[in-house]
Amino acid sequence: MPQTEERIDAVEQEITGIRSDVRLQNAMLIKCGEQMSDLRTGQHELQKGQEELRTITAELRTGQDELRKGQDELLAITDELRKGQDELRADTAAIRQTLEEFRSAFAVVLDEIRIQKAWREEFSDKVARVIAKSEGLEA
């Protein structure tokens, strides 16, 4: 019967090996289950992250559109300001020209006043001499 005992020992060793393998496989299955759970959690987190990224991207696009609108408005305001400055320069130039023309006309009037004053003084002197002659005061 030694042969039977050897066979029983061999079978028991095989059963022990199989049990060890089953335990190892069970541990590996548990580990695989944990990893699958981690993968599902990671996938869920990834999906949430992708949604957040889409939301942020949409907000960024909206912000960029608003920035472009703001830039366009700023350019329009700047253009209007430039036009206003150009108009102001033109008005200032026209006022300067009018002022120069006024100064020239005023200078002519002053010259005429000086001439009139000199003529009046000369005429007053002549009138005074004529009056004096007529009254016999001047010889």
Image (tube, grey):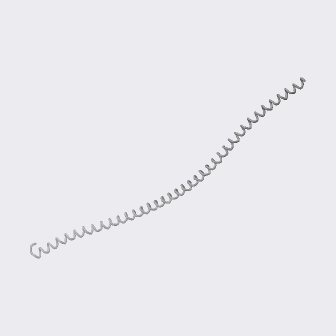
Residue at image coords 60%, 52%: 55
The location of residue 21, given as percent across then percent down, is 78, 33
Front one among 3 and 136: 3
Q: Does residue 139 appear anywhere in the picture?
A: no
Viewer-closest of 122 and 85: 85
Residue 41 relative to residue 84: left or right: right
Q: Residue at x 74, y 38 (%)?
A: 29
* Residue found at x 33% / y 66%: 102
| Residue positioned most to the front | 1
Q: Is residue 82 above or below residue 37?
A: below
Q: Quadrant of the N terminus?
A: top right
Q: Position of residue 132 (x, y in %)?
A: 11, 73
Answer yes or no: is residue 22 visible: yes
Q: Which of the 4 image quarters holds residue 96? A: bottom left
The C terminus, quarter of image: bottom left
User: Residue 12 lies in what quarter of the image?
Assistant: top right
Q: Residue furthest bottom?
A: 134
* Residue beneath the point at 20% across and 71% down: 120
Residue 127 in the image: above or below residue 33: below
Count all numbered tags in the image, as a single digit. 0
* Camera-nearest residue between 89 and 6: 6
Give x and y (percent) for residue 24: 75, 33
The residue closer to the viewer here, 71 or 60, is: 60
Residue 44 in the image: state x and y as whole percent: 66, 46
Q: Is residue 42 above or below residue 59?
A: above
